[in-house]
Image: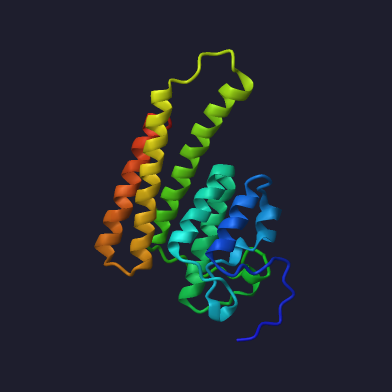
């Protein structure tokens, strides 16, 4: 279906462009740059002019954004779930494709994406904390005792393991696995992320 919209944001073609846009945003991540990035429309179906990225790519995008600004990432998560509801009733997607927060808000239909995206934000926060802790020592207080290398290795490994489990959980959605398999995969990822946040001294 042809669309005659004057878009204020680019329409990203695929997952590669979506991930590149998310990484570019981390330096200047705010409401305006998010709207101008094209990321608001990445779950819009291709038949309606969007990129229709997979749950796996969407999770990676949200994880990247959460390391930059967890609060704005939460808003993006809520927006994404609104788009999922729009997908379920075939639109309309005009606002989203124009780089605007949608004004049409159908009832949100909780599905496997909701807990998956929650886990992505939690992991992003954990990655942000570890990165900032390391940067604080190296850039702001190098005269203090260096973090124990073994501890940094342990935390980094835990984060990577949790991220791998999150990726697997997202893939179960993309592959159309049974609900029980999806729930189990998300639960495993969430447990790994919770254990990692505890190691970082964050509330679980």
What percent of the width, then of the height, locates residue 4? Answer: 71, 82
Determine the image quadrant of residue 132: top right
Residue 203 makes an appearance in the image: no
Closest to the observer: 50 or 17? Answer: 17
- Circle count: 0
Closest to the observer: 86 or 18? Answer: 18
Q: Is residue 1 above or below residue 159?
A: below
Viewport quadrant of the C terminus:
top left
What percent of the width, then of the height, locates residue 109? Answer: 42, 66
- Measuring 45% from the left and 75% from the top, which residue is drawn there? 88
What percent of the width, then of the height, locates residue 70? Answer: 55, 44
- Measuring 54% from the left and 77% from the top, which residue is drawn there? 46
Q: Is residue 112 above or below residue 136?
A: below
Viewport quadrant of the N terminus:
bottom right
Q: Is residue 125 above or below residue 189?
A: above
Residue 80 makes an appearance in the image: yes
What percent of the width, then of the height, locates residue 21? Answer: 62, 57
Colouring mode (rainbow / by chain / secondary structure / one colour): rainbow
Left or right: where 161 falls relative to 142: left
Q: In the image as oriented, which residue stretches furthest toward the bottom? A: 1
């Amino acid at each position: 279906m042809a669309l005659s919209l004057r878009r204020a944001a680019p329409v990203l073609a695929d997952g590669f462009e979506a991930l590149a846009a998310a990484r570019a945003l981390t330096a200047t991540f705010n409401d305006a740059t998010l709207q101008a990035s094209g990321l608001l429309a990445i779950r819009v179906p291709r038949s309606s002019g969007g990129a229709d990225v997979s749950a796996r790519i969407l999770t990676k995008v949200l994880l990247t954004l959460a390391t930059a600004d967890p609060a704005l990432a939460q808003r993006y998560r809520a927006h994404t779930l609104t788009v999922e509801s729009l997908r379920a009733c075939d639109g309309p997607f005009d606002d989203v494709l124009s780089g605007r927060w949608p004004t049409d808000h159908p009832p949100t239909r909780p599905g496997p994406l909701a807990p998956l995206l929650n886990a992505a934000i939690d992991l992003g926060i954990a990655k942000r904390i570890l990165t900032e802790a390391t940067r604080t020592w190296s850039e702001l207080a190098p005269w203090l005792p260096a973090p124990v290398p073994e501890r940094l290795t342990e935390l980094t490994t835990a984060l990577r393991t949790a991220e791998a489990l999150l990726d697997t959980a997202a893939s179960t959605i993309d592959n159309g696995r049974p609900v029980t398999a999806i729930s189990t995969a998300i639960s495993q990822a969430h447990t790994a992320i919770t254990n990692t946040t505890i190691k970082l001294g964050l509330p679980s």
